[in-house]
Amino acid sequence: MRDIKLHKILKDTFGYSSFRFEQHRIINSVLDGKDTLAIMPTGGGKSLCYQIPALYLHGITLVISPLISLMQDQVMNLKETGVKAVFLNSSLSYQEMHKTKEKILKGKVKLVYVSPEGILSPHLLDFFDKVEISLIAIDEAHCVSQWGHEFRKDYTRLGELKLKFPDVPVIALTATADSKTRTDIADQLRMNNPAIFVSSFDRPNIKYVILERSDELKQLNEFIKAHHANDTGIVYCLSRDKVERTAKALKKLGYPAVAYHAGLSQEIRSKNQERFNQDDRIIVVATIAFGMGIDRPDVRFVAHLDLPKSIESYYQETGRAGRDGKASTAWMIYGLQDVVKLSHMLETTDADESYKKVARHKLDSMLALCEAATCRRKYLLQYFGESGKESCGYCDSCIEPPILWDATKDAQKIMSTIYRTQQTFGAGHVIDVIRGSKNAKITERKHDELSVYGIGKDKPKEHWNSVLRQLLNLNYVAIKSWEYRSLCLTAQSLEILQGKATLQLRKQEVVLKKKDKKEGRSKEGQHDRNELFENLKALRNKLAREKNLPSYIVFNDKSLHDMCNLLPRNESEFLLVHGVGQNKLENYGTAFLNLIKEYHS
């Protein structure tokens, strides 16, 4: 009986014909009253794992969500499907807050979204004492863990909710958590013997491409122009200044680009967020704060111009591409300065040594992904404890296998130079000595008189940067002083210096093939439906503007493609379209059916 009702809610409310990944088992775990931890890939349908139980159970479901924009987006989406949902946060006026609380007390609401800071405030805790709470859902649960990559203080206090509401089951959801982080999340939330579900981390529609940095803006332009010229994308940068410089450069190149970071005024951020929601084609250049919980399904690429600090961060951010399951790209460039910068930021924080130790390991793992000569996808899956094929056929390492070369002699040259300069200088100075630079710092220290001076002048700076970065990653060279960023040798260095071992390194090439043949074939197959698709999209966008909604909340592209394939003739057939439930049928069915009718032969 339960199962019939769950499938009815899934189809009638959300318009989906079947559950995905572990959704069905997770929902049943929650309904059995168990504390539940769900790890599902971005775009895997985590929200349904608490939204469907919310509609099944009496009382309200309390959803802890990290961002106001995310709460607003979720509530807007639920209202379009006919679900009664509200949020309580600082964006509401006193009168709006009062009215919303009245609705909750009168039982007119099924889901209430609040921030971690809000739910832990005394006045809201007292308010929820008066309400029947059936479930507590904690979204972006990696923020709970001290090992998480989005450490946020108030998240670590959410275990207090278990003390306040001991009989209410808790579901925690995130896209990224290794085994250590999963254990920590459960402990921090005081979960009682939780059921843990880990879906596959594989996103087969995402192509992973990682390149060495040479000229980042030129590389970014060439990538977008060749592969995503008319697509929506996100470009991540580490600093606010770089975000603005990159957005400005892209606009100059003719791309519809906007900047997004915390230093911009609320008005500008809201305007740019709205453009991201509404425009068919837009590129948002942002710091990593942008995008948590993004629901836009047609982001075709995510580009990183700086190295993320962990695999978790990288996976979470790249997962914002291709939520609709269509071919998308995760593209990244990195360089030696990224390693030094992130390491310096870590070592100069006030965090304790145990945290730094874990963070160092995470950064090392991120670097290892960049330098890996094997399949990127296999490495990612292994990191999260999942086995994968030796070759996925859809990452740069598989499409264009890397060339390995014997770097033993060049490694010896770098190590000898570090040693001869007393292990007290950074990468730039070491490479200047090797290349025979005549700058003042070299001559002042008489380093132009060393036997190693100029021994690598036949090769460009980029070559030596690449070798040195890989030596750092493989622990043949280390950073001795974070303040001065000076390099030193390690115990492993002797093996290479004394010729007892050889060293094979990855020779990176800036290569990314043009559109895959399979992508081309799929587009040819859709050619006959292109006109209808464009007209459906125009209708969707018009209705979205009238209701002041993001277009994908009316219908996402997947639903429009389904309409093109099914060509529904009546309301019953329209309900077969992916994402069409009763509420959307009532709101939009007539308009879309009338348009589709014109294309029936």
Image (cartoon, rainbow, N blue to C red):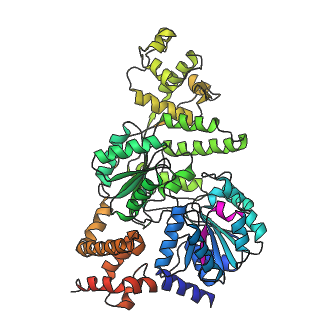
Query: Quadrant of the rendered structure where residue 554 is?
Result: bottom left
- Which residue is pictured at 65% across the width and 63% down the height? 118
- Which residue is pictured at 52% across the width and 51% down the height? 314
Residue 365 seen from this side: yes
State left or right for residue 534 relative to residue 93.
left
How many numbered marks are there?
A: 0
| Quadrant assignment for the C terminus | bottom left
| Quadrant assignment for the N terminus | bottom right
User: Residue 473 at x, y = what percent?
Assistant: 56, 37
- Which residue is pictured at 56% across the width and 33% down the height? 472
Which sits in the foreground, 383 or 171? 171
Query: Quadrant of the rendered structure where residue 555 is?
Result: bottom left
State left or right for residue 223 relative to residue 440.
left
Q: In this view, does 553 lie above or below 231?
A: below
User: Residue 583 at x, y = what percent?
Assistant: 45, 84
Which sits in the foreground, 554 or 506? 554
Which sits in the foreground, 540 or 597? 540
Q: Is residue 60 above or below residue 173?
A: below
State left or right for residue 324 relative to residue 99.
left
User: Residue 353 at x, y = what percent?
Assistant: 72, 40
Question: Is 344 colored magenta in this rendering?
Answer: no
Which sits in the foreground, 476 or 199? 199
Q: Is residue 583 above or below residue 463?
A: below
Q: Which residue ends up furthest to the front in the rendered image?
A: 95
User: Residue 106 at x, y = what percent?
Assistant: 64, 83
Q: In this view, does 431 lie above or below 577?
A: above
For the record, the magenta segment spans 109-121
Residue 190 seen from this side: no
Query: Quadrant of the rendered structure where residue 206 is?
Result: bottom left
Question: Is 119 colored magenta in this rendering?
Answer: yes
State left or right for residue 360 relative to residue 575.
right
